[in-house]
Image: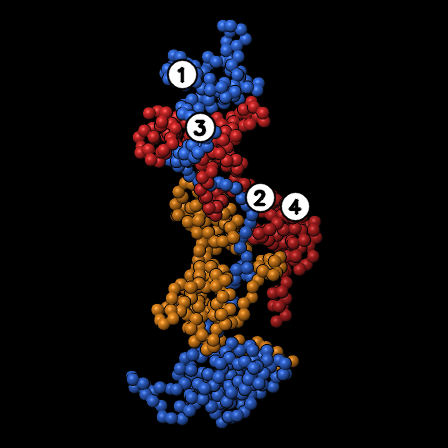
Chain colours: A red, B blue, C orange
């Protein structure tokens, strides 16, 4: 009976191979980085810190050219997927795609139809001060870019649409955007009436 | 069978004739008694324990003996605990009823089979015992987090890989909104301006970011470009100058005209 | 310019080696089992289910005699540390184990083997009224769920086990549970006794 209990309660170290395997398993199954102290907790027997470090180095080279990297961060060691896999892995648990807010869409429209424009221009047209988020989102999306500075006090940036904007909207050029004048001529006036300046000028 | 049941077989069997005999295992230190009685999951669990303890054949239960033993336990539980689950009392009543029905001639079922008054109780005991064992079996299965540890390595999250889709129509609607609303501000009017002019303004400005000084004529390809395009390009240059985004320079009469950004 | 956009926006599959590597990385970094559907989401291109299954088989044999097992559970595939490592690994996070009471385990057994059952069914089988806590704990753990109402007066809820229950117990389906009919013959006396009686008598 005793040997059975013994085997059950103690992790018997057969060799350094076993220690190394346990270190690897601990790293692969841990959601947080593991410190040398953590690794020591795995064993009943005392394993020298230097032994653990040496074995971690071995594991690191075992995984060279494989799918994961053993890296050291401030709180310890962890396995990390090669960064080239990250984008694909994100598709497994995609963040919910949110729609652009009305504000962002309006800013995009102003940049598209009135380019090049400064932030001040956008604010003047919309009649409200602009949340910097709106332009940031459009810059990140690479639909809008800064093409220079306007030489007025403060040298504000000039925003214009990009090639990617045209690509993503399936346009060859900005001129292919729907024309507001065409719209007012062809469609019922109700939507923009009674005060559409463009149509009054045209007709 | 194991050692435990061997010892049990050496003990005197407690069938019907030993009615009223206190089960020996009731001699328990008082403070342990509560814990002990509490360890039963209910009357069926207690009955099963008594049956197994006394090595009773579950298909031929001596009702008088079992009922007596059960009652002793229930009395003990009542004495210790103020609140005893009603289910225990219900079971007492059921046991007594079965016991008394055993004294009457056995009735017959529709199919002519003899109906044992104990049948229903036995069926319940067998089913509960089965589920009890099932629970023990479940506990033996390696469980996630206890005996099963799964891979959970780290990967660097990429932020904002997915963007919302936007159609040209949506963009146009946003523009219509902007115009509609702009009308409400008296101090600012949206004047009509050709999109192509705006586009050329951007093109010219972009080329002036790449090179400081660009020759005026390089924007015009009189042989290839249609006249409207030449006009639009010229208008764009005028508009850029008017908005003070570019400067037009000429060193001396008839020398080349250069465009440059306002700053440089 | 176009190749740049392409490279930036799309994950380009170079070969089946790459596909297999991505499958492995996904498995090593996922805290939940991954289904074939999940694996397909990793790729922009359509990868056949049969290809994925074949590559999973390859990964399984690649890991033979190593530290982790690729196993299949109800909702998909996952890597699990060899069971011989479990005890040592538990020392890293000893407080994470939830131990359920006998009552809760009995209720779980009844739901697992007699599903779908109502609360009343459970009470009838156990011969005692049910502490609502037991079902609440199992619902919270997501091992048990309500799958409908029984069409009898009061319309009591019907309880059944979940995919997570199967996953957590490493089962593909409910049919893989230990065979209930085997129990009746094999039960030994001591197992049926409350544990504490023997110790109190002997001491």
| Circle 3 Cα neighbour tier, 10 Å, few/some/many (<14 / 14–19 / ≥20) | some
How far apart are the alpha carbons under marks 1 and 2?
Answer: 60 Å
Q: Which numbered disc flags the more N-terminal residue, 2 or 4?
A: 2
Q: Image height check: is C62 above or below A138?
A: below
Q: Are marks 4 and 3 in contact (CB under 8 Å)?
A: no
Q: Are marks 3 and 1 on the same chain?
A: yes
Label 2 to label 4: alpha-carbon separation: 16 Å
Residue B238: give x, y in percent of width and height: 46, 17
Q: Residue at x 58, y 87 (%)?
A: B24
| Discs 4 and 3 carry the same chain letter | no
Q: Whole-Å distance between the Cαs marked 1 and 4?
A: 63 Å
Label 1, on which residue?
Answer: B231
x, y percent for residue B131? 46, 73
* Residue, disc 3: B189
Q: Chain of mark 4?
A: A
Question: In 3D space, how far apart are the residues under numbered discs 3 and 1 (Cα atoms)?
Answer: 25 Å
Residues at marks 1 and 4 on the same chain: no
Residue under label 2: A69
Q: Name which residue lies at 42% across and 66% down.
A: C159
Whether residues under marks 1 and 4 lie with C-beta atoms below 8 angstroms apart, the answer is no
């Amino acid at each position: 009976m005793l040997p059975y209990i013994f085997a059950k309660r103690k992790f018997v170290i057969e060799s350094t191979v076993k220690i190394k395997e346990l270190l690897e398993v601990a790293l692969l199954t841990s959601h947080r980085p593991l410190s040398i102290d953590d690794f020591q907790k795995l064993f009943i027997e005392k394993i020298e810190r230097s032994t653990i470090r040496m074995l971690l180095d071995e594991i690191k080279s075992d995984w060279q050219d494989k799918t994961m990297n053993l890296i050291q961060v401030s709180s310890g060691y962890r396995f990390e997927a090669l960064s080239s896999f990250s984008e694909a892995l994100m598709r497994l648990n995609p963040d919910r795609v949110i729609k652009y807010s009305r504000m962002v869409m309006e800013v995009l429209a102003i940049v598209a139809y009135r380019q090049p424009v400064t932030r001040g221009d956008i604010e003047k047209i919309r009649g409200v001060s602009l949340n910097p988020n709106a332009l940031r989102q459009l810059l990140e999306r690479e639909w809008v870019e800064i093409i220079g500075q306007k030489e007025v006090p403060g040298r504000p940036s000039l925003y214009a649409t990009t090639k990617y904007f045209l690509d993503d909207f399936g346009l060859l050029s900005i001129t292919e955007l729907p024309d507001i004048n065409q719209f007012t001529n062809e469609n019922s006036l109700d939507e923009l009436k009674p005060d559409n300046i463009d149509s009054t000028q045209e007709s | 069978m194991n050692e435990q049941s061997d010892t049990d077989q050496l003990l005197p069997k407690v069938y019907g004739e030993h009615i009223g005999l206190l089960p020996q295992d009731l001699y328990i230190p008082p403070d342990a008694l509560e814990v002990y009685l509490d360890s039963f999951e209910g009357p069926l669990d207690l009955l099963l324990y008594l049956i197994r303890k006394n090595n009773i054949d579950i298909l031929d239960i001596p009702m008088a003996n079992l009922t007596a033993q059960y009652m002793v336990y229930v009395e003990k539980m009542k004495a210790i605990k103020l609140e005893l689950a009603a289910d225990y009392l219900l079971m007492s009543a059921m046991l007594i009823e079965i016991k008394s029905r055993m004294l009457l001639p056995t009735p017959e079922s529709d199919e002519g089979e003899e109906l044992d008054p104990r049948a229903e109780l036995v069926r319940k005991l067998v089913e509960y015992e089965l589920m009890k064992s099932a629970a023990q079996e479940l506990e033996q299965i390696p469980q996630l987090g206890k005996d099963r540890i799964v891979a959970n390595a780290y990967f660097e999250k990429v932020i904002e890989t997915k963007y919302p889709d936007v159609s040209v129509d949506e963009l146009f609607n946003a523009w219509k909104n902007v115009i509609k609303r702009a009308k409400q501000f008296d101090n600012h009017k949206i004047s009509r301006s050709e999109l192509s002019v705006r586009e050329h303004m951007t093109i010219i400005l972009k080329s002036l970011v790449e090179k400081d000084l660009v020759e005026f004529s390089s924007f015009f390809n009189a042989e290839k470009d249609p006249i409207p395009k030449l006009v639009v390009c010229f208008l764009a240059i005028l508009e850029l100058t008017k908005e003070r985004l570019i400067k037009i320079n000429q060193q001396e009469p008839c020398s080349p005209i250069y465009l440059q950004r306002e700053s440089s």
